[in-house]
Image (tube, grey):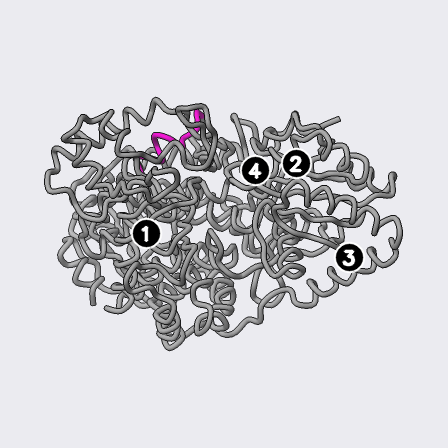
Amino acid sequence: MNRLGGATSPYLLQHAENPVDWFPWGDEAFKEARTRGVPLLISVGYSACHWCHVMAHESFEDPATAELMNELFVNIKVDREERPDVDAVYMGATQAMTGQGGWPMTVFATPDGAPFYAGTYFPRARFQQLLQGVSQAWRDDREAVVAQGANVVAALNERAGLPSGTLPAAPVLEAAVRNLTESFDPRRGGFGGAPKFPPSMVLEFLLRHGTSDALAMAGKTMDAMARGGIYDQLAGGFARYSVDAGWVVPHFEKMLYDNALLLRVYTHWWRSTGSVLARRIALETADWLLREMRTPEGGFASALDADSAGSDGSHGEGLFYVWTPEQLRDVLGDDDGAWATSLFEVTGTFEHGMSVLQLLADPDDGARFDQVRTALLAAREQRPRPGRDDKVVASWNGLAVSALAEAGALFDRPDLVEAARAAAVLLDDLHAAEDALADTPGGSAVDGPVRLRRTSRDGRAGANAGVLEDYANVAEGFLVLYGVTGETRWFHRAGGLLETLLARFPDGSGGFFDSPDDGERLFQRPQDPTDNATPSGQFAAAGALLSYAALTGSARHREAAEAALGTVSVLAAQYARFAGWGLAVTEGTLNGPVEVAVVGPADDPRTKALHRAALMSGVPGLVVALGPGGTADVPLLEGRGLVGGEPAAYVCRGFACRAPVTTPAELRAQLSA
């Protein structure tokens, strides 16, 4: 009996027809294992994972393998995107036992969940041997196996967490830039060798740091990614990572979180430099998000698969995206086909003579390029499309809200702001609910604590509680949306999320756990203060807390933000690549942050001009409040009104405020001082 048919996760639904007797994560599976006296086999993956599909086809769809699994184990299938807490603790165990990690992740555990053996992808024959070997060890020497599981858990708990230092000072940031320089690839951009992942959080830090060395590393990396095969040169949007050091051949899945983070950083690159390339990539990525990732409810889907079907009926990774010279000529004709073959570097960069499209140089004929790209995109749309994981993840949608709201404001694209607002409404209406937390210090009726659900799908909230990154990134998105629109709903809802964050997630030493104190008890409470594919929950929390503190004057929120940044001091000099978001937030902390209250009628062009001047400044840690002024609804606006009957801007930094100004030029001068 396969129990995945009622799941909201597309990944679990992909396995609902397997001959494996899968359980979803939950008490029923643990009870079944204890009743039968057999170990757990915990398989963790996600819908866009190429090797997850391979292992599923080889093993989980194979009746003989499924028979072994069903006879010898209780089998649990986990979507890592729905349950990042479960994924985190078992990934820690897998890395500790094997020295590496990844997905699919395969963990054998006692009926109480203690892991005793782990790995990633196993070919079918080896997997069958492993099933039999683990089962025999369980039967013949169960006491030793249980002891091994207890030892693994004890060792993981002993080394959990990361020592925290003090709030980083300027020398720490300079040391981080030096550390990044050591691993920077000056020829191809990025950091380290193959594979190369988009270093979104590090890029944000480098842009905020703003020295010539920092800007050069950021610019080289963003230029190389935008021109390489990791970027979809026809439709926009970035793939998960490049398998080579030159950004040529991607791992083809496209993730919401990557594209939201990169949309924001390319927007900031344009704001800092005026780069034409940065503007194009930002807008193309935003348009791709709206065109291909929006759900009917207004949120954004999680991912597009790496795999798709080929025109000849084959099935494999990247077939939707790659081309041969012959295919280009078939679509474009001989002349344009030859031109496109040269322009897009179609020289057999992938497999079987196919190529991923690159655009290493700007085309010499813009009109011709637009025609060629339009024709190729139309032809590509006739191919079988990759699958889409259409569940809505709160955290990643929070990242999308921030990115789209800023891009919409800076590029004068109201449709992008409206898309950010629609996603925020979905998060607030479907994922969020009031929480009756008792004795929450500093709370208020209007900013009362709010609880989040991690996911939704088809307008139905999932069962899994939000984790730290959900609260932090959604709060950040709401605060950015407030700063762009002046709609106080988002300011207050962010305050409610941060009340829950401060009440449920602290670790007692200035940091935060990744799961709430009333969440499900796993063998270890997950806590990872370092960045991975997304900002660490701890650093994201610091950023949202800092922004809220600037808008409210709350010492409690600022002190919590500064304490959460303590691990940056530990990481910066040697592991800066894993602290990019914390370094970026630290830049804002040390810079003030800078608070700008823009007051005036919303429809007055003078108000709009001041507001745009504030948003365009690019000052690290800038926080903008927008409203009619003279209201206590947002503390930064309280007591501030028009000046001589004109809209005005009030600039404050470090508890000191300048005289109000009424022109964009005066505001820019104050912000650049």
Dot 1 or dot 4: first in sequence order is 4
> At which x and y percent is residue 642?
22, 50
Q: Nearer the viewer, mark 1 or mark 4?
A: 4
Magenta-colored span:
285-296
How far is mark 4 from mark 2, CA to CA?
8 Å
Amino acid found under the numbered disc labelled 3? Gly
Dot 3 or dot 4: first in sequence order is 4
Marks 3 & 4, CB-CB < 8 Å contact: no
Q: Mark 3 packing: few (<14 Cα in 10 Å), some, or many (20+)?
A: many
The image quadrant of residue 649 is: bottom left
Q: Residue at x 26, y 69 (%)?
A: 213
Q: How many marks?
A: 4
Q: Secondary structure at mark 1?
A: helix
Dot 2 or dot 3: first in sequence order is 2
Hey, which residue is sitting farthest bottom in the picture?
Answer: 171
Q: Nearer the viewer, mark 3 or mark 1?
A: 3
Of residues 572 and 194, the one nearer the viewer is 194
Query: In which quadrant is the N terminus drawn?
Result: top right
Residue 393 in sight in this render: yes
For mark 1, what is the residue? 265
> Is-magenta flag for residue 287?
yes
Q: Which mark is residue 149?
A: 3
Amino acid found under the numbered disc labelled 2? Ser
Marks 4 & 2, CB-CB < 8 Å contact: no
For mark 2, what is the residue? 59
Q: Secondary structure at mark 2?
A: helix
Amino acid found under the numbered disc labelled 1? Val
The image quadrant of residue 212 is: bottom left
Q: Which mark is residue 54?
A: 4
